[in-house]
Amino acid sequence: MTDEEIIRLFGERSERAIAEAQRRYGGLCRRVAVNVLGSAEDAEECLNDALYAVWNAIPPECPQSLCAFIARITRNHALTRLKARRRQKRGGGEPEVLLSELGECVPTEDFADKLIDGQHLGELISGFLNAQSEVNAAVFTERYFHCRPIAEIARESGFSQSKVTSILHRMREKLRRELAEKGEFI
């Protein structure tokens, strides 16, 4: 079933839309949620919450890319769940490292909240990534959107971990300079 057909089912309020969206994008969304939360059980709950949020969002929303729309909602739900879990139990982990890394180039007090809710920031970062090489944009996206560990990105890309780390560092510096030049988030 195509994205357009699934979106039409959501518009018609057919419960089949949820099943089709889960069939088509459930694997990707679970991976995103597991990478953020570190737990298959939490990821499954997060996916269910995300699909419910998609149900409530379409209509009135009519996303151009259903895949990106569902993945973004899933990631946002996972980050919200992680934030709530951190409030209950202080501890470290990969998502905290990611937020810390990105906080270097977008220095704000409430960066995590802006990351979760900031459509404007998302548009700025998308524009930034569109201007980068395909390889660099893919490494950045895998790390900061899909929350994948550097070792995994290195293994799948064929780069060394130090090369991935270097690409990410240069990309964060470029992003920081670009946002500073535009007067954003400084």
Image (spheres, rainbow, N blue to C red):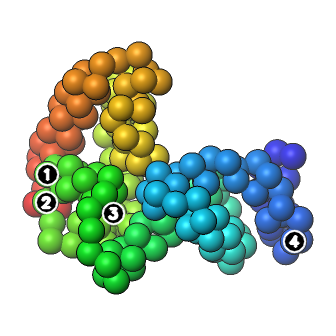
**Residue at (46, 61) in percent of width and height:** 37
Task: Provide the residue designation for mark 2.
Answer: 107
Q: 10 Å neighbourhood of mark 3: few (<14), some, or many (≥20)?
A: some
User: Residue 146, how many percent across, how many down?
Assistant: 46, 46
Task: Provide the residue designation for mark 3.
Answer: 115
Residue type, numbered disc 3: Leu
Q: 10 Å neighbourhood of mark 2: few (<14), some, or many (≥20)?
A: some
Residue type, numbered disc 2: Pro
Viewer-nearest residue: 185 or 73: 73
179 versus 129 height, above or below: below
When asked about the image quadrant of residue 112, the answer is bottom left
Q: 10 Å neighbourhood of mark 4: few (<14), some, or many (≥20)?
A: few
- Residue at the bottom extreme, as displayed: 88
Q: Are marks 1 and 2 in contact (CB under 8 Å)?
A: yes
Q: Is residue 50 left or right of residue 101?
A: right
User: Residue 115, how many percent across, how many down?
Assistant: 33, 63
